[in-house]
Amino acid sequence: MIKFSDKQLKIPQMQRPVFLVTGGMSKFDRSIPEKRTEELVIDSFVEAAEFINKTPAELKEYIHSCYYGHFADHFGDQLLGEAVIHDRLGLDPLGNVGIKTGGATGGSTLWEAFKAVASGYSDCVLAMGWERMDEVPTDEGNNYIASAADKDWETPLGHIYTGYYAVMAQKYWQVFGKEEESFRHTMAEIAVKNRGYARMNPHAQGPMDITVEDVLNSPVVAYPLRALDCCLMSVGASCAILCDEKTAYELTDNPLIIYVSAGSHTLRVADRRDMDIPLLPNESPDQYKDLGERFPGGDRYPGFTSFLAARMAAYYGYRMAGVVDPTEDLDLVELHDAFTISDIQTYEDIGIRPYGEGRTYVESGDCYHTNPHTGEPGKLPSNLCGGLIGCMHAVGATGIMQTVEVGQHIWGRWAEMHEDQSKWDRFGRTKPDDWTNLQVEGAKRGLAISHAGVGSHVTATILVHPDHQLERNES
Amino acid sequence: MSTAKRGKVRVERGRYRLDGQFHFPYPNDPIRNEDGVLMGITNPRDLTHIHMYGGEAPFFEGLGQGKLLGTRCDNQNCDANGSIFIPFRIHCPDCLGKNTIVDMTETAQKGATVHTFMITERTGAFNTLPKPIRFVNVEFEGVPTILMGYLSVGEPEIGMKVVPIFNTTKPSYTILDLSWVPEGTNESDIPEGFTFG
């Protein structure tokens, strides 16, 4: 049984508040042969500058240090790629550092940027993430991704990361899904939803107008996961500018308060030892006592069914931002839907639903922009950009892209950034005739989760409109 | 492919002694679009890494000898005292003391259970296992961790009793030298080169 000390569970303190001022993103696609990575990075930076009516040169004048997220040197085939990007952005002689935490690289990049401003080291920082996964064929890409598992104990087993994930999916499916057809149907709904929302996003590479049956009939990757349950492999870049309060209001009239927290757990699922469930503010010590009775096999925590890293990111982050109940206190979320089943697992880890009941977030319709059962706005819409399944997973960029997307909703500018025909044309994409504005009306607070591997690193980024702050809650 | 001998390594007096070639260069090829415009180049390469097992070497040597080795924290002042680790951990994750190597072969032969599993036809490049691959994550009596491996005979199920088999005939000195079969499997049914240890 693992125990944590009070010192380890301290709720992070900032020396001063940190603000998200702007962000941008490139086009995302499976391959972008016509552009170098540096060009995609510049595309995202230019979008961020234009979003606050600045030229790139004007915005650069404010930046004091830079945080670069790039998961895999293997994929880019360029060690110290951060130096290449930094030079092409013309940001010498500013200090910069590369950040690598697998799938959570984007979120971790924001975490480092956040701390740099919170500490007073910098008043304005650039968090930029990218990935170029098209330099090798897909099976070699899968081998590279599998290199992020333990190279002696896991990678030789098939060189396929999906497999290391699928054993967790299988356990969750059997214990909490009880192998019910209805649960499998719920998983498929997530794939339909996220690919459908991607249709409204000109940046997205995987838009599809599909049905649950299409998902259930797609090829099996590792049962119960099918091809349409899985995320994309991508190329692209995304960035965010974080500032202290004074600088933020020099750059824009409407910055958002940002909090970023992080958790971790073993790289190998194999090494996980049992522990008590760390509780979120909306949970009580007794509520999981009968979890093993309600879900036989579900009493081993975190076991193969939960992500402790996600739980801890939420544990710290909610208390930093004053979130008690995410469904009540947040207006939208962007989750790391690497697989439909891990999306459901995450609902529980971050307290959208109690452990064992994640599926009800989908089945209630709460996760939709418009609840399909009531026609009313969804209570907590998720992954309106399409997520990793529908939009992209250009690993180093993902967590940043999702945060920028949440920000665009709170700024009330989602339609402006997704509707413009010239952007669809520039990306060579056809805007659907039934294009729909997915702006979450009146959004004031949102969350983005960035997640690595089978749960080795997870970050929680919370955005809050300054006029709608919650009281910090350390209980 | 060059006809040069692929590199081999031995360690003598704490230093690597290399023999043969460790990388094989190939020429680049241009990549053009349908209009013949240069877009990029291919960058082929073939190289050999030199990878040390360090304190885990006894585990990988043990597999080829039909043994499943784990480790145990014997620090009486540590909360994890008595915990057995499979995967083999050189140091206790709590006190960071050096663990004691313990032979878990008999425990695995008597009481290994499938905690979870997956079956896939898909693999990444460089996979050498026959497809479909059946991963099994195996629990042992009295061990808090759960080891990932692959099932060589039958179809996996949660709760299934399994026993280890080892590539003792021609070991690869990798984790692939360890596999699992359902309890009661006949020796004649296990893959060539493998034994029950």
Image (cartoon, coloured by chain):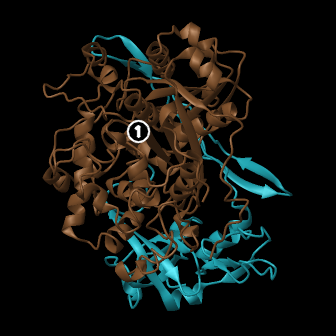
For residue B123, above or below residue B148: above
- Label 1 element class: loop
Asked whether residue A413 is in view, the answer is: yes
Of residues B115 and B70, the one drawn nearer to the viewer in this rendering: B115
In the image, A267 versus A62, the foreground residue is: A62
Image quadrant containing the C terminus of chain A: bottom right
**As rendered, which of A62 and A475 lies closer to the eye?**
A475
Please tell me which residue is depicted at 75% across the width and 75% down the height of the picture: B99
Q: Which chain is cyan?
A: B
Comparing A92 with A360, the one in front is A360
Report the residue marked by disc 1: A393
Question: Left or right: A87 with respect to A289?
Answer: right
Residue depicted at 24% across the width and 45% down the height:
A193
Residue visible at 20% across and 30% down in the picture: A436
Percent position of residue A450, x then y: 49, 45
Chain in brown, by letter, is A
Q: Amino acid at mark 1?
A: His
Residue B37 placement (x, y as % from top left): 35, 10
